[in-house]
Structures are given as C-alpha cells and as structure tokens.
Amino acid sequence: MNKIMRALGIAVAAIAFTMSNAATSSAAVSQDGTAYAKPVGGSFPAKAHFKAYGEVFTISDLKADGRSGIGVLSYGSAASTYYYWNHSGSGTTITKDLDIAEGTPLHIWSCTGNFQGTPTGGLDWSSGCNPNTDAGTSVWA
Amino acid sequence: MKLKLLGRSVASILAVTTLSVGCSNHSSDGTASATPSEPAPTSLPPDSLPVKMKEAAKKGLGFSARDATDLGRTVDLQHAELWRACLTRKGAGPDSIDFGAVPRGEECPTQWNAHVPTPKTPDLIGKDFEKSYVQLLKKGYNSRFIDVFYGSNGIVDQQDVSRVHGEVCSQSPKSGEPYDASENVKLHVAIGKCPSA
C-alpha cells in the first residue's frame, strides 16, 4: 500500500512539474514589443505595439503632423507583411485582434505616410516609410 | 470568444468582398470615383496599387502586396505607383486583404501565381543611368535589390540614388539573362561617360 501511495505521489509530482515547465516555457516564448517610427523634431510620430496576451496589435498616431501612423505586422516574408494605416488623427489608436498560434514569431515596425497622397492620388509612401530600410522589433504570440 | 471571432470573420469577409466588387466595377477610362469632400485623383488609374491600398485603409483593412504571378517579385512600395492591383483575397492578418499585383506594363493574370514567361534582363550598357533605373523599376525590379556603384564612391545608399548621373558601364546579370528574384542587380555607373575600352 505504501509503495502504491509513494508511486502515486511521484506520478502526481511529475505531472505537476511538467505543467509548471510548460507554463514557464510558454511564458518565455510569448513576448510583447513596441516599435516606434523614426523620430521627427525630437519626438516619435507613431508607434506599433504587440501584446502577446490576447494577441493584440495596436497602431498609434502620436503627432499632429498631418501624417498617418502606420503599423506593420510581418509574418515572415515581404509577401506576408501587412500595413495598417491609422488615419484617424493625432492621439488616436486603432486595435487589431490577432488570431494566431502561441509561439508564432512576428516582426513589427512603425512608420508614417501621407494618407491624402500625392497629387496623382493613392497613398504616399515616398517619405516617412521605407519597408526596405525601416527597422523593427521581433515579438512572439 | 467564438462569437467575437465569428463576427470578426464575417466583417472581414464583407469588407474584402466589398473591396473586390469595387475592383471589378471601376471604369476603364482612367477615372476614379471619390467622395465629394476629397479631391479626385487626377493621374493614377483606378487599378493603381496606391489607389487600391487607400481604399483598403479607408475601410480599416490592413493590406499586403505581392506579385500576382509565379515570378515571385517583391512589390516595391517605394514605387507602388508603377504597379497595378489585379487580384484580391482575404489576408492572413486580422481584418486584412492581399493584393496580387504586376508592373503596370504587364497584363493582369486571372489567377494567383499564374505562370508567365520569365522576363529577360535588359541591355543597359552605355545607357543613361536614370532611364535605366526607371526601366528596371517598371519591369518589377525592387529598388532594394538594385546595387548601384557610382564612380569610385562604391555602393550608393538607396536615398542617394537620385544624385547618380552618368552612363551605365557594366551590369550584372548580363543582358538577356532570365529574371531571377533571388539575384541582386548590380550597376556600375560612371560619373559622366564610361571610360573607353
């Protein structure tokens, strides 16, 4: 009987250790992150933030400069990189709820663009946002 | 939570559907519809990538842009006006849309990853750099993957390319070689004329 109880105790302890380990590694894998657009006149004009808990991506326009804040979310390649424009004005934040597997690596960054565009129409990427050179930060869902 | 997800999915599908319908309803006369409060685009055609991107952003959608063909070119957002949006589908990101695009001089494919003939590298030797550079961009080469060497100054930063004036003295890949998305184009440009051989 003692042997059975001891074996049961060891089994319960082993299960508890495994669960604790899983929780620890899960927490270690998930990581929040914030990326700021290049500073203009000493302040950041926009930022993108990823919150791993709940998988929430927010894009904030921080400066009244007539430009939109852009949050960029990349799943890896250039073809799977998504651009979110916050054209609601300075001081506003838009929120996007992601639905992705835990531990998924992502890359985020922020920049600004002209929503009114050039005289030829469309969005204007020509200044403030260069996907070829802008740096960002890595996060994990 | 499931209701939230369902609601989001339905909203995304509706938004993408609306955008897709918008794509097919544009007239072919080069005019774009615009709300009265905003100045109408005057030059960019309605299927131009920046115009389509703006329509998506107005709807609160994120967007990606990728080559609609099987050439795997990376769409150059710094020169998005040189691309036309041909195809749309629901994106992998939240509330998002994928644009399938081709350079403006090409015909739109009717399906994603459509097979098209591989373009040949143009002959740029002895030609004016600025015209050559634009020619490459119009063919779908990404400015990120064009290395410009100018005089004895070595490689030129992307933001300084507009300061390069002169003849293209050598190029890689060579003229006539098939386009390869994984290969950078290298252009050696003289300050002025190329030295005679």
Image: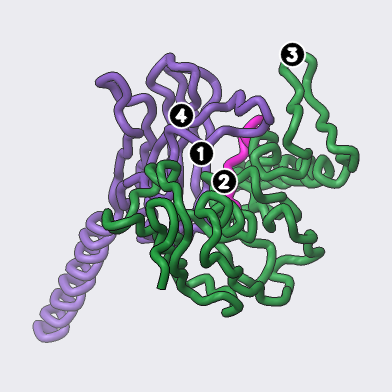
Chain colours: A purple, B green
Which residue is labeled 1 in the image? A96
Do labels 4 and 3 touch, CB within 8 Å?
no
Write the residue at 49% across / 58% down: A78
What separation in Å lies between label 2 and label 4 (alpha carbons)?
A: 20 Å
Which residue is labeled 2 in the image? B79
Secondary structure found at label 1: strand
What separation in Å lies between label 1 and label 4 (alpha carbons)?
A: 14 Å
Say which mark, if any, is on residue A69.
Answer: 4
Say which mark, if any, is on residue B37.
Answer: 3
Q: Chain of mark 2?
A: B
Q: Chain of mark 4?
A: A
Q: Residue A67, percent across and down?
A: 49, 23
What separation in Å lies between label 3 and label 1 (alpha carbons)?
A: 28 Å
Query: In which quadrant will I find the N terminus of chain A?
Result: bottom left
Write the residue at 54% across / 52% down: B76
Write the residue at 60% across / 45% down: B80
What separation in Å lies between label 2 and label 1 (alpha carbons)?
A: 27 Å
Write the residue at 53% across / 49% down: B130
Q: Tell me, yes or no, if residue B163 can be seen here.
A: yes
Q: Tell me, yes or no, if residue A102 can be seen here.
A: no
Do labels 3 and 1 touch, CB within 8 Å?
no
Which segment did they paint magenta?
Answer: B56-65
Do labels 2 and 4 touch, CB within 8 Å?
no
Q: Which label sits in the foreground, 2 or 4?
A: 2
Q: Nearer the viewer, residue B54 or B128?
A: B128
Check disc 4 and give the amino acid type. Gly
Compared to residue B116, the image places residue A48 above or below, namely above
What separation in Å lies between label 2 and label 3 (alpha carbons)?
A: 27 Å
Compared to residue B80, the image places residue A86 above or below, namely above
